[in-house]
Amino acid sequence: MKVDTQLAEDISLAEHENLNIEMWGALSKYTTFKIGGKAKYIVKTENRLQFIEAVRLFSSHDIPFYILGGASNVLIDDKDWNGGVIITKTPPTDFKYENGIVEVFAGDYLPALIHKLASWDLGGFEFLVGVPGTVGGAIIMNAGTSTKGICDYVEKIEVIGKDGKLYLINNKELEWGYRHCNLPVEGYIVRAWLKVVDKSATEVLGFVREHMAWRREHQPIDMPCAGSFFKNPENTAAGYLIDMAGLKGYRVGDAQVSTKHANFIVNLGNATASDVLAVVSHVKKVVEDKFGIVLEEEVKYISHDR
């Protein structure tokens, strides 16, 4: 839909002075892939109330929008987006703790939250420290390892529905699966209550150091990318199949299958979403031809053709 150019100024100055609205900002600077076109309206929220206000703002003006947390598991269209984007990623400033449960904002940056909890001698989900995303994004993707996910630590969540209402949803009401979580209402996660355990900062941070050292050795985490690109098929690993297909180093433009870990596609400097999609298409075809297995993307592609 077409959006009035004057609308952002009207909104920020007259109706919502506590929201900072950026016009025609580059989305590439917010993604770990460093790829993406511009968005007409970008709102960076720092807390629960700002996030709720931003959602209701765009909804009330019939402006199409989507949410980005850490933007670490997405590939954004090269085209510009004639709508809104709400950026929730923020350092955790505070959390409430009671009886083994912490209440946090969905936009809290997960690695920073894990470190902050460690300073209180709390832990439990430090295995997620290598996920450069937010709590909300980690829940929607059911981030985790091959043996456990954040689903094991969620007590309940608060969601703002597309109707503008707030809902409290218990873990058992959520539909969990491999790298996804379906909400029972259409909407966006605002807060989460997570289970933690008493654990010394020494133990938590020791695990974090070992985990990150292993990742740096085996994965291209210091290059622009979106993490593991494909879901692991049953009884095998996507990276193994891609490697055995001889695709390490395969490149289109500046998008390349990592030479360090085949399930990572990296941006060598000036890759576009089109470059990445071309690499993905080729990888899927070759793997299917060689092994009869259809790889499924874990990274979500956000198209601006809507």
Image (cartoon, grey):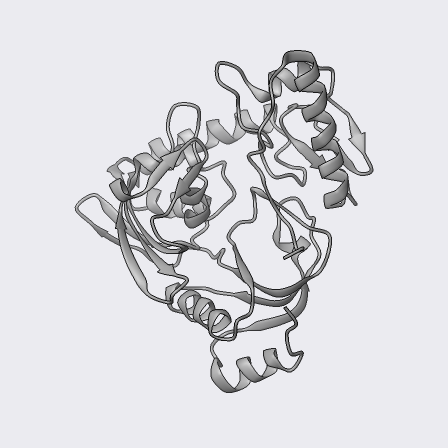
| Residue 121 spot, x, y in % from top left | 28, 41
Q: Nearer the viewer, residue 296 or 199?
A: 296
Q: Quadrant of residue 119?
A: top left
User: Residue farthest to the left?
Assistant: 99
Residue drawn at point x = 68 percent, y = 48 percent = 34
Residue drawn at point x = 73 percent, y = 20 percent = 247
| Residue 240 spot, x, y in % from top left | 61, 16
User: Residue farthest to the bottom?
Assistant: 14
Report the label total.
0
User: Residue farthest to the right?
Assistant: 253
Q: Is residue 251 above or below residue 91?
A: above
- The quarter of the image holding the C terminus is bottom right
Q: Is residue 267 visible?
A: no
Residue drawn at point x = 69 percent, y = 52 percent = 36
Q: Is residue 108 visible?
A: yes
| Residue 27 spot, x, y in % from top left | 65, 57
| Residue 281 spot, x, y in % from top left | 71, 31
Q: Is residue 305 above or below residue 198?
A: below
Residue drawn at point x = 61 percent, y = 39 percent = 226
Horizontal side of 31 relative to 209 (left or right) equals: right
- The quarter of the image holding the N terminus is bottom right
Q: Nearer the viewer, residue 81 or 144?
A: 81
Q: Quadrant of residue 51?
A: bottom left
